[in-house]
Structure formats: structure tokens, C-alpha cells
Image: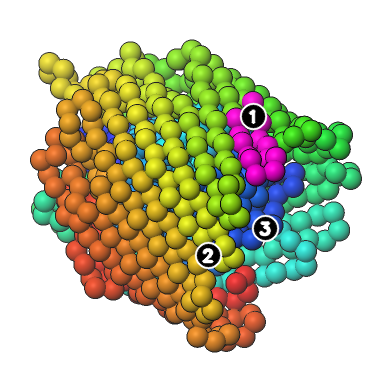
Amino acid sequence: MRIHSLRRGRNGRAPCVRVRFAVALSLPWTLWQPAAHASDVSLDAVTVTAAREEVRLDDVLQDVTVIDRATIEKYSGATLESLLAAQGGLQVSTNGGIGAASSVFMRGANSDSTLLLIDGMRYGSASLGGPVFYNLPLESIDHIEIVRGPMSSLYGSDAAGGVIQVFTKRGEAGFHPSAAITAGSEDYRGVDAGARGAAGLFDYALQLGGRRTEGYPATNAASFNYNPNPDGFDQASASANLGYAIAPGWDVRLQSIGVHGNVQFADGFDPTQPALTARSRLDTSSTNVHIAGAPLSSWTTTLRYGLSRDNYDTDVAVNAFDLGRFTTVQRLAVWQNDIALPVGTLLASIERLEQSVESDTTAFLVDHRTVDGLALGWNAKSGPAAWQVNGRVDHNSEFGVQRTGAASYGYEFAPGWRAIASVGTSFVMPSFDELYYPGFGNPGLRPQHGTSDEVALAWQAGSQRARLAVYRNRFRDLIAYVVSGTNYLPENVGVSRILGATLEYGGRFGPLDVAATLDVMDPDDVTDGTQLARRSRRTFSLKADWDFSERWAAGADLRGAGRTYDDTANLQPLGGYGLVAARTTWTMDRNWQLALRVDNLTNHHIQTVYGYDAPPRQAFLTLRYGGF
């Protein structure tokens, strides 16, 4: 069994073996425009993730958060995971700081039930069966859309808890150069530069970046992987988003991102070589090209072909068992159609997905699979009522036919007040490791299936808004590693039931912008009555930003979580915590800005994974030109 200490545990259960994969998926981009942050909702803001077509943010029925570029810039020097951890309905556990493995739990669902998309391309890990966030630089991201709730009826496998979609920067009229330099704790250094523009029929966005940090010792003496050396990280990235209008109403677009990283991690300590620390090379790439147009005024069609490649290569290790390379290649062809109906829009999409994995140390019994998918949807609004209905059929070369569906209905019963009800089904495929890793795989595993329902009450009046959502998730055939004789094998043994509620509020009062979230849930394993690992029953966040003048602004975040457990038996508790972060910006003129941020202001000791310390107090100073 090949256990990688950096990736300890599937969904907080137990160590699991390592293979990684990335997939591609299409989204309609014909009429794309940037969406606004949830704290600055406007009538023109749209989201594409919630319906795979444009829906105005104030009309969407799902629980959606849109994080805009201005908010992302407040996190310079930080990780994508730390940004996600501050959002309602999401809990994050990490094995250290920047570059470390992480798990994201949406509404209490397992980490393999969160689907990550990059410009419509699926990206994740076949070993954990979940998304991979740690090699995605924030400076390459324009905005992020988070959709909570079952989305398999639109996106297929892995979207049982919800979808997180990352959008890279896109061109706009004129010429807009930008650059940023960041220095911070643990000898952090980051440099980024880019340009966005459009001329005639052509638009472009190009971005280059690099960062390096000495890191800190992420493990403590409680970890079986303890190593006192700091865990360093360095990264280089490039992205391009190019578009050309080939005819009136038709355009072709190329979207590509490539990232190379080197991460150090603890996999034990060798007293004969005290300076030795394990190191892995990370390579992330995602490229797709699509052509979109309108054959008729009521019909928009999109043809897309994409390829994703994920490479993880451990070339230095204390434990030689960790050495080796694993590569996954995904190819996808999609034809999607959006047809305007007398009421609403019909979505019809067909897809062909191919996944393949390879390794220089492991021979898999099966290293290739295909998925053919057909998705249909109807999204409409009539007077005070709005609804969305979706159905999908996937034929998997390993698991046969999987059917999912979802329906949502909303009604505006008073000005600014809307009641919403929804229900949906989902499924999650077992990973290649769980199925075929030599000696530790189980080819007889079945996909996880789930059913979720939700009722919500939403209110908006001017710049103020609030939403209360009450949900229930039930998942069966959960996969856990169990002892079977002398072997340690994955089995379909679990059933979980998650009852929860999320209360969100946000508003602007003159120069003050505030947002608050409270999450309460019971993440229970029905099989044995325990609490699901690494999921707290109570979490909250409070954010405040104050514009002192046109040039000066300051803000603070308070985030906390109650006690949880690191294991499924609930024998290893992890204490609750509260985190405080502060920031300030000085806009020197319309092109230059200086920003300071301090995380974990009180230097609180936190473990979201037993034996691994979350980052201590850190400070980052950023000088930015343009782009804000």
C-alpha cells in the first residue's frame, strides 16, 4: 500500500493511497460577464455555475456566493483554501500552510462530494476522490462562484455537496496592465504581472506569477510524520484567455492555465539526516478551446474540447515508500445547446469524457474509463414564480448507468421576500486507488448515492440582504477503509445524515460593509451514531470593512468553529478555535495601492488535522499596480 503522508485520509477517515485526476466539463460562455461579489449584488450581476447558463444573481434559486476580484486581492500571500474557509457552509481542514493538502466540506458532505471547476474544467484527486486546491495561485483568479447543494443533475459525479468554480481573468476593452509584489512572514516573496485588453474582434488576458516561502514546521510531536524542519513551497504559473469574434454572434475562445510547484512536507524524521525533508513536484494544467454562436435568435450552441493534466511526483522522501510519480490525463468533448422557450430556457448537453492514469511505481488493474453524459434542464421565471428542473444520465464504463435529477421552486410573496424549496439526487464515483490500487483496492465498490432537500427564505432591500436555509442530506454507500482479515480495504459501509441550517446577513451602512454567517448542523454517521470526522457542529464568521476616505480603508474578519474529531470513532478530539485577521489599504492614486494584512492576529494554536499545526500569526505587505 502506498500511503502519502501529505494526503492523510479520505474525508477525514483514514490514510488512503495516492493517484490524482482532473476532468473537463463545459459551460456556456456565449454571453459571459463578470459576476459581482455577494456583498455587492446588482441587478446586472450573473452566475453561470448554478444553471450552466447565465442567471441573474438576484434570480438564482440555489445558495450561491460570488467572490469578486477586489475580495481576492485582500488575501494576497494567502491560499485559496483560507479564502474558502471564510465562506458560509464550508469547512476546511489542512495539513499545514501554503502548498499543503486540504479537504473542503460543503454542508457537512465528504470532501469527495465537492466539485472544483477551473473555467468549466473539472479538477481533482483520484486518490482522495476530491478537489485539489493547493497548487492554484490566487493572482490568476478573476472571481469564484460557490453553489451549495446537490449539483450532480448538471455536473455528474462528485457534485453531491456543491460546486466551486474558479474563473481566470478575461480581456476587456482597452489596455489594462497590472502587477503586484508581496513580502511576508516566513520569508514569503511573490511577484505577479499581467495584462488584459481588447482590440477590434480580439480580446486577451495574460498572467504570469511566482512565489516562494521558507514555510514553517507544520507537524507537531503528536504526528506520526513529525519532522521539525520547515515546509517550504515555491511556485510558477502562467495563464492565457484569448477570444476572437469570427462572425457576428460567433466567437472562438482558448483558455489555458499551467502551474508548476515544489512543496516540502513531513513524512517522518531521519536522525542520521536531520536536514532531510520530503519534497514533491506539482504540475497543474488545464486547457480548453470552444466555439460558441447563435444559429438562430433563440438558439445558442457551444462546442468544446478540453484536456486536463495533473502530475504529482515525489522525488525526495524520508520514507522511500513515498517516492514515485502519478499522472492523470482527462479529455472531454461537449456539445451544449441553450434554447429560448416562450417561458424560460431549455438546456441540452451531451458529453464524452475519457480519464486515464499512469504511474512509474504502480500498475493499476484498470487505468482508463469513459463517461458519456446527457443533461437536460429548464430554467424559467414568470411573475413572482421561478423554477429550475434538471435531469442527467451518465453511462460509466465501470459503473453503468447513473441517473440524477433536481428541482427548485421559488416564489416572491412580498417585495424583497422569496420562499424557496428544492430537492436533488447525487452520486460520487470511487477513486482509482480505492478500486484498483494493488493489494489495497476493492474492484467491487459501488458509487455513493445521496438525496438532499432544502427550504430557504431570502430577503433583500437595497444593499441589505439575508438568507436562512434549512437542509437535509442523506448519503448511502459511503466508502471507508476497514480491516478485513489481514488486509486494510475500502468498503461501502457508511450511511450519513446531515441536518443543518445556515443564516447569512450582509449589508452596507454608508462607509461600513458588514457580512455575517452562522452555520449549525448535525453531521452524523447513522451507521454507528458518531460525528463525521473534521466537521464541526457550529461555525460562524463576521466580516467588516470601513472606507475611511477615498484612499484609506481597513477591515477585520472573525471566524470560529466548535470542537470536532479527527477520527470516525470520535476518540481524537480537535479543539474549537477563533481566528482574527486585520487588514488595511492605502490607495496612493488611481494606479497604485499598498495593502497590509495580518492573519491569526492573536497567534492562536489551531489544529484542523491532528498532528498538523495551522499557520501561526503571519503578515503580508503588497504593493499593487493597476487591476484594482
Q: Residues within 10 Å of mark 2 (few under 14, many from 20)?
A: some
- Residue at label 2? 464
Residue that appears at 23% across and 71% down: 603
**Residues at circles 1 and 2 in contact by the CB criterion of under 8 Å:** no
Q: Position of residue 9 (x, y in %)?
A: 26, 38
- Residue at label 1? 377
Answer whether residue 462 is visible to the viewer in this image: yes
Q: Nearer the viewer, mark 3 or mark 1?
A: 3
Answer whether residue 312 is visible to the viewer in this image: no
Which residue type does callout 1 highlight? Gly
- Residue at label 3? 43
The quarter of the displayed image where residue 346 is located? top right
Nearer to the camera, 179 or 402: 402
Residue that appears at 86% across and 58% down: 200
Q: CA distance from mark 1 to mark 2?
A: 31 Å
Residue that appears at 45% across and 40% down: 455
In the depicted structure, whether residue 311 falls above or below residue 230? above
Which residue type does callout 3 highlight? Leu
